[in-house]
Amino acid sequence: MIIEKGNPQILYNEQTLDYYDGIVPRIGASVTFYGAAVVRQFEMMGVESTISSEALLRTRDKLQCLQRLSKSGLNLPKTGFTNYSDDAQLLLKSLGKAPVVIKLLEGTQGLGVILAESNKAATSVIEAFNKVRCRVMVQEFISESSGTDIRAIVVDGEVIASMQRIAPEGEFRSNVHRGASTKKIKIDEKYERAAIRACKVLKLDVAGVDMLISDKGPLILEVNASPGLEGIETCTGINVAGKIMKYLVKKIKAK
Ligand SMILES: Nc1ncnc2c1ncn2[C@@H]1O[C@H](COP(=O)(O)OP(=O)(O)OP(=O)(O)O)[C@@H](O)[C@H]1O
Ligand SMILES: [Mg+2]
């Protein structure tokens, strides 16, 4: 990237990339910083994008995401966060009581998501993470979702595909990488509205919204700005990538 007055440029090898109308950023979690900078540079060049650099950065921070959603009227699992506080008991008391789910802030694919069944277990785990200065969120455990969650893909204010993920026997995490199976479903209108609203709040036109099924209705677990497409396309037979491209072309033409 070359940053200079009035002439933002992106070079790839020796070629200047100055002929694009739009981009579909696919930014992996490990390259968020540089990826967001590239998207921002394209924005400076007047190129349309399916996601803004700001929204990308906002959603990469799971805690920030939940904080923003909490104000929007959407339901979420009640979540606690401290600055490595010694008083795990107080944190647990504020959340209700065990079981709780303890999550590494930087975890993905279900790794770093721990179910602590008792206050005693939760306290030891929280204290251990605090000791090694590893940031965790502590969340009420939604037992009625029992190893399943819903992934809805939202494009341009509409749920275009959805699936249910079902954890294998004995596992509470419904990540495909942890052996979960997937099932195409038509989600209830309440879930559809919640997914669309979450994207609106986070200013995302394309996203994967993960929800837990609870007695209170949909609970937003997470919003992913660069959702994987293979799993949902295979499960539902819907051409998700095609719909994203269609949306981008519409955006470019409207300019
Ligand atoms: N509070 C909770 N109550 C019940 N089950 C939960 C809760 N939080 C997470 N789970 C289960 O654990 C799985 C993984 O949790 P989560 O999506 O928060 O982390 P991750 O998958 O590691 O992160 P990422 O989705 O960014 O890769 C969820 O799909 C869900 O099945
Ligand atoms: Mg997840």
Image (tube, rainbow, N blue to C red):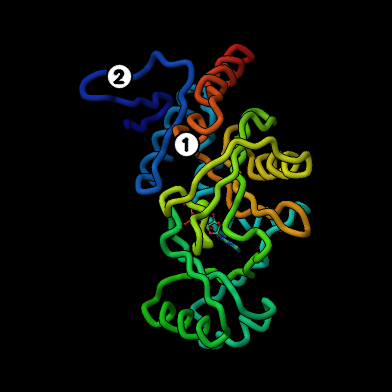
Image disc number at residue 231: 1
Judged from this view, the residue extending furthest toward the left is 14
Whether 215 is drawn above or below 55: the answer is: below
Q: Nearer the viewer, residue 57 or 145?
A: 145
Crowding at mark 1 (Cα within 10 Å: few <14, some 14-19, many 20+): few
Residue mark closest to the camera, 1 vs 2: 1
> Which image quadrant is residue 164 in?
top right
Q: Nearer the viewer, residue 108 or 16?
A: 108
Q: Earlier in the sequence, mark 1 or mark 2?
A: 2
Q: Amino acid at mark 2?
A: Thr
Q: Nearer the viewer, residue 88 or 67?
A: 88
Image disc number at residue 16: 2
Crowding at mark 2 (Cα within 10 Å: few <14, some 14-19, many 20+): few
Residue located 55% across and 50% down the image: 166
| Location of residue 6 in the rendering, given as x and y in whole percent from the top left corner | 43, 25
- Left or right of 71 on screen, residue 134: left
Q: In whole angstroms, how far apart are the C-alphas of marks 1 and 2?
A: 34 Å
Residue located 41% across and 82% down the image: 128
Whether 122 is drawn above or below 77: the answer is: below
Residue located 62% across and 39% down the image: 152
- State the SS at label 2: strand
Task: Indicate the quadrant containing the C terminus: top left, top right, bottom left or bottom right.
Answer: top right
Q: Nearer the viewer, residue 64 or 215?
A: 215
Residue located 50% across and 29% down the image: 233
- Label 1 CB sits under 8 Å from any ligand 2 atom: no
| Location of residue 39 in the rendering, given as x and y in whole percent from the top left corner | 44, 33
Q: Amino acid at mark 1?
A: Gly
| Location of residue 10 in the rendering, given as x and y in whole percent from the top left corner | 33, 26
